[in-house]
Image (cartoon, rainbow, N blue to C red):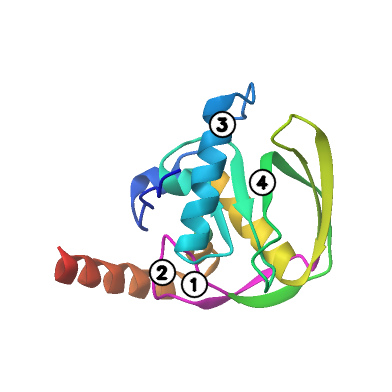
């Protein structure tokens, strides 16, 4: 297993649209393991393949407090959503930035597991937020793009400044 480098907003590669996973082979299983390790190490509650510069529909999430409820979702699709909730979000690709985003309160997501089995997960609360946030990444969308243009500009400036300091 190995830790994977995470792209940082506003890296243009975060805007790529991920392709569906065709066959679930050893390469995909290795990627899923490495992504999970990278997410736990960060630490974060979700990671999309897009964030590690692999443009395939694969996400890992674990929104549990005990950090032992790993979900690996291949080709995830939101098939049902209702209600609304506002939650403060952060992102491993946008370090140090947290802001409130409105999303569906409840979602049902259909996906394939690592053995190619068809599954669905029904989620509310934090897990629902996390699933929507990660599936957004696969569409090339980072959570800050839900915020106002002014906030986005401030975030870009802040991250550019951080990059200059750490470079
Ligand atoms: Ni994110």
Part of the protein shown in magenta: 89-106
Which of labels 4 and 2 is toward the front?
Answer: 4
Please give the residue where the numbered disc 3 appears in the rendered image.
Answer: 28
Alpha-carbon span between mark 3 and mark 1: 36 Å
Residue 148, numbered circle? 1
| Labels 2 & 1 near each other (Cβ < 8 A) | yes
Ligand 1 has an atom within 8 Å of the beta carbon of the residue at disc 3? no
Upstream in sequence: badge 3 or badge 1:
3
**In the rendered view, would you say 104 is above or below 22?**
below
Q: From the image, which quarter does the C terminus lie in?
A: bottom left
Badge 2: few (under 14), some or many (20 or more) residues near its Cα, within 10 Å?
A: some
Badge 4: few (under 14), some or many (20 or more) residues near its Cα, within 10 Å?
A: many
Which of labels 1 and 4 is toward the front?
Answer: 4
**In the rendered view, would you say 7 is above or below 147?**
above
Alpha-carbon span between mark 3 and mark 4: 11 Å
Label 2 sits on a secondary structure element that is: helix
Label 1 sits on a secondary structure element that is: loop
Residue visible at 39% across and 69% down in the picture: 95
| Residue 131 position in % (x across, y down) | 68, 57
Upstream in sequence: badge 3 or badge 2:
3
Looking at the picture, tell me which residue is in the foreground, 139 or 96. Answer: 96
Q: Is residue 126 magenta?
A: no
Badge 3: few (under 14), some or many (20 or more) residues near its Cα, within 10 Å?
A: some
Which image quadrant for residue 89?
bottom right
Residue 72, numbered circle? 4
Alpha-carbon span between mark 4 and mark 2: 30 Å
Please give the residue where the numbered disc 2 appears in the rendered image.
Answer: 152
Upstream in sequence: badge 1 or badge 4:
4
Looking at the picture, tell me which residue is in the foreground, 63 or 167. Answer: 63
Label 3 sits on a secondary structure element that is: helix
Alpha-carbon span between mark 3 and mark 2: 33 Å
Q: Is residue 95 magenta?
A: yes
């Amino acid at each position: 297993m190995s830790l994977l480098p995470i792209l940082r907003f506003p890296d243009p590669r975060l805007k790529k649209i991920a392709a569906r996973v065709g066959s679930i082979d050893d390469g995909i299983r290795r990627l899923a393991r490495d992504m999970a390790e990278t997410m736990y190490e960060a630490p974060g509650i979700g990671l999309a393949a897009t964030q590690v510069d692999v443009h395939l529909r694969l996400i890992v999430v674990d929104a549990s407090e005990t950090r032992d409820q790993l979900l690996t979702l291949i080709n995830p699709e939101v098939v049902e959503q209702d209600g609304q909730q506002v939650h403060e979000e952060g992102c491993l690709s946008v370090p140090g930035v947290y802001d409130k985003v409105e999303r569906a309160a409840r979602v049902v997501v259909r996906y394939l597991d690592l053995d190619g089995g068809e599954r669905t997960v029904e989620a509310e609360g934090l897990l629902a937020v996390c699933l929507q946030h990660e599936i957004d990444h696969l569409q090339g969308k980072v959570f800050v793009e839900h915020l106002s243009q002014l906030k986005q500009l401030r975030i870009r400036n802040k991250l550019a400044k951080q990059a200059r300091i750490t470079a």
